[in-house]
């Protein structure tokens, strides 16, 4: 650490490729990029960026042809003032929970963008995140960090990690650039966890007993025509032993099948993927990516903190990996130890928060599986086995039979990754039953009615104003958005 500030060196192997498949992000990405001084227009121009307004989950509940629900990015109308769940449960007229409380499912169905060309950068009428080409996004960010944020970028292979007698990391020896010394080392070496795992010996806690998927097959599918409609939601479709992600970028779709090898052979999984993308694409190259679901036992040890895949990975069902990178990077920046003396205190707090976050993501991902009514394959039957459900989630599911999750339940921690709104969308999207006593809705009925009307009005307003997804992306690439 230098007096009066810090210098940051990014060491990256010229030969070891990035994983290159993280294509779905969270709305947090907008504030992260804005804070870093990245232009949103440039993001659209250089990273194949597209809008993401949530996830559409098909086939998760019954597997029937019309089985689908949305987990949108907008919280239910009036969420901090009134819980609309009991009102929907009592009065619904065939309307989905998502449509009752938010415009976003209908915007996605209509293929609309979340903003217009006159919206300023990072501002939108509807909440949004991005789909992007990970292979383009990483070098785009690296370039920005070098040119605008004075990060030193060293293209070199780390071949040895040097520790002092107390076990602290002193420096890393690289093949091309010699020894590079430092005070704090951020291990972002991907699945290899070169510093925290291999050097400092921090163990890995698997969670395959809860989440079974351990392999991904990834493929890039071209559009049939350059003006083909683009979904502005990630589409996750459930299959016999896993699920596919389907992400629309301006020039192609990024598709992958994430499955459990204990329940399906790779040959059969490739058939499932082909069923999803269509046999006409059978010659496209498919990448097999092994997934080890779990996380490090701790994330910050001595003067080394792991971020990204080095810290752990859970199946990408809710795109929860890059957001963890953002949250960890923000926390490290905000809590940057002023001296070695305070580093262990900060490390302990970082470990607590990150462990909590991983735990809650595991719970939330498992929720998508435990609510299924599918019994067609062992994969789905095994997922509802109570022995595979975390205790905390079991307890909450019992509670939610009698009261729905709401914002001031226990989901109000600052470090919460999935708020109660997310639980509402998944629970009631998948037909969970919460018992409602009519008298409990009486006091809030006028406010609830107003919010429902507001939602209808807002939906109509957005439907009339918002352009189609592809149309707006092309305009942004051509003319740009107004800088903030
Ligand atoms: C199938 C799959 C789908 C995913 N989908 C999503 C998604 O939709 N949304 C989401 O948020 N996340 C997703 N992720 C996770 C996401 O891709 C990662 O969290 C994100 O890309 C960050 O990866 P990383 O930088 O930690 O690791 P990597 O991308 O693996 O980068 C590791 C870096 O370390 C360098 N390195 C390694 N060893 C050395 C060495 N010895 N010397 C020097 N450099 C070294 C490499 O060169 C590379 O630059 C997905 C992951 C997988 C596997």
Image (cartoon, rainbow, N blue to C red):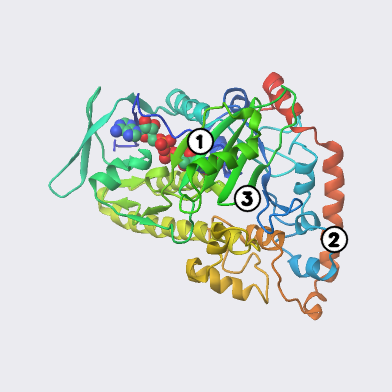
Residue 190 vs 37, above or below: the answer is: below
Residue 309 vs 377, above or below: the answer is: above
What secondary structure is found at the residue carrying circle 1? loop
Crowding near the residue tagged with mark 1, few <14, some 14–19, many ≥20 C-alpha atoms within 10 Å = some
Q: Which residue is drawn at 69% across and 60% down?
A: 430
Residue 261 vs 79, above or below: the answer is: above
Which circle's residue, 2 or 3, is located before the other in the chain? 2
User: What x and y, as percent, mark residue 30?
Assistant: 60, 39
Which circle's residue, 1 or 3, is located before the other in the chain? 1
Q: In this view, does 15 lie to the left or right of 361?
A: left
- Which label belongs to residue 21? 1
Q: In which quarter of the image is the N terminus?
A: top left
Mark 1 vs ligand 1: CB under 8 Å?
yes
Mark 3 vs ligand 1: CB under 8 Å?
no
Residue nearer the viewer, 313 or 283: 283
Total labels drawn: 3
Q: How far apart are marks 1 and 2 (CA)?
A: 38 Å
**Mark 1 or 3, closer to the camera:** 3
**Mark 2 or 3, closer to the camera:** 3
What secondary structure is found at the residue carrying circle 2? loop
Label 1–label 2 contact, CB within 8 A: no
- The quarter of the displayed image where residue 271 is located: top right
Q: Ligand 1 is in which quadrant of the figure?
A: top left
Label 2–label 3 contact, CB within 8 A: no
Name the residue tied to disc 2: 94
Q: Quadrant of the C terminus?
A: top right
Name the residue tied to disc 3: 238
Which circle's residue, 1 or 2, is located before the other in the chain? 1
Q: In this view, does 27 lie to the left or right of 97?
A: left
């Amino acid at each position: 650490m230098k007096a009066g500030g810090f210098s940051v060196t990014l060491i990256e192997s010229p030969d070891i490729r990035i994983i290159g498949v993280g294509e779905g992000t969270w709305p947090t990405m907008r504030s992260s990029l804005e804070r870093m001084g990245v232009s949103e227009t440039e993001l659209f121009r250089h990273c194949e960026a597209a809008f993401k307004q949530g996830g559409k989950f098909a086939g998760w509940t019954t597997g029937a042809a019309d089985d689908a629900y949305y987990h949108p990015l907008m919280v239910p109308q009036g969420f901090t003032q009134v819980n609309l769940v009991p009102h929907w449960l009592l009065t619904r007229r065939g309307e989905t929970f998502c449509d009752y409380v938010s415009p976003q499912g209908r915007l996605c169905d209509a293929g609309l963008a979340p903003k217009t060309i006159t919206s300023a950068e990072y501002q939108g009428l509807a909440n949004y995140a991005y789909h992007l080409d990970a292979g383009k996004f990483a070098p785009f960010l690296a370039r920005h960090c070098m040119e605008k944020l004075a990060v030193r970028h060293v293209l070199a292979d780390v071949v040895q990690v040097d520790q002092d007698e107390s076990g602290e990391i002193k420096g890393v020896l690289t093949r091309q650039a010699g020894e590079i010394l430092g005070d704090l080392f951020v291990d972002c070496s991907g699945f290899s966890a070169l510093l925290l795992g291999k050097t400092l010996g921090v163990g890995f806690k698997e969670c395959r007993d809860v989440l079974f998927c351990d392999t991904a097959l990834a493929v890039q599918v071209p559009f049939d025509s350059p003006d083909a409609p683009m979904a502005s939601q990630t589409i996750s479709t459930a299959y016999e032993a896993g699920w596919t992600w389907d992400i629309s970028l301006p020039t192609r779709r990024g598709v992958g099948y994430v499955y459990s090898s204990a329940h399906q052979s790779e040959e059969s999984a490739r058939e499932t993927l082909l069923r999803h993308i269509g046999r006409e694409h059978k010659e496209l190259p498919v990448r097999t990516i092994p997934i080890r679901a779990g996380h490090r036992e701790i994330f910050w040890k001595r003067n080394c903190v792991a971020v990204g895949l080095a810290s752990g990975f859970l199946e990408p069902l809710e795109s929860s990996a890059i957001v963890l990178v953002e949250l960890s990077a923000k926390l490290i920046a905000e809590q940057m130890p002023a001296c070695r003396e305070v580093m262990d205190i900060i490390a302990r707090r970082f470990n607590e928060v990150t462990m909590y976050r991983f735990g809650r993501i595991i719970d939330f991902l498992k929720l998508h599986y435990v609510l299924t009514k599918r019994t067609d394959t062992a994969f789905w039957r095994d997922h509802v086995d109570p022995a595979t459900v975390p205790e905390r989630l079991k307890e909450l599911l019992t509670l939610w039979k009698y009261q729905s999750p709401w914002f001031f339940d226990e989901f109000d921690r600052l470090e919460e990754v999935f708020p109660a709104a997310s639980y509402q969308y998944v629970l009631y999207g998948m037909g969970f039953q919460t018992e409602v006593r009519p008298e409990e809705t009486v006091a809030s009925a006028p406010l609830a009615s107003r919010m429902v009307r507001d939602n209808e009005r807002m939906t109509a307003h957005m439907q009339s104003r918002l352009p189609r997804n592809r149309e707006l992306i092309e305009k942004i690439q051509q003319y740009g958005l107004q800088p903030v």
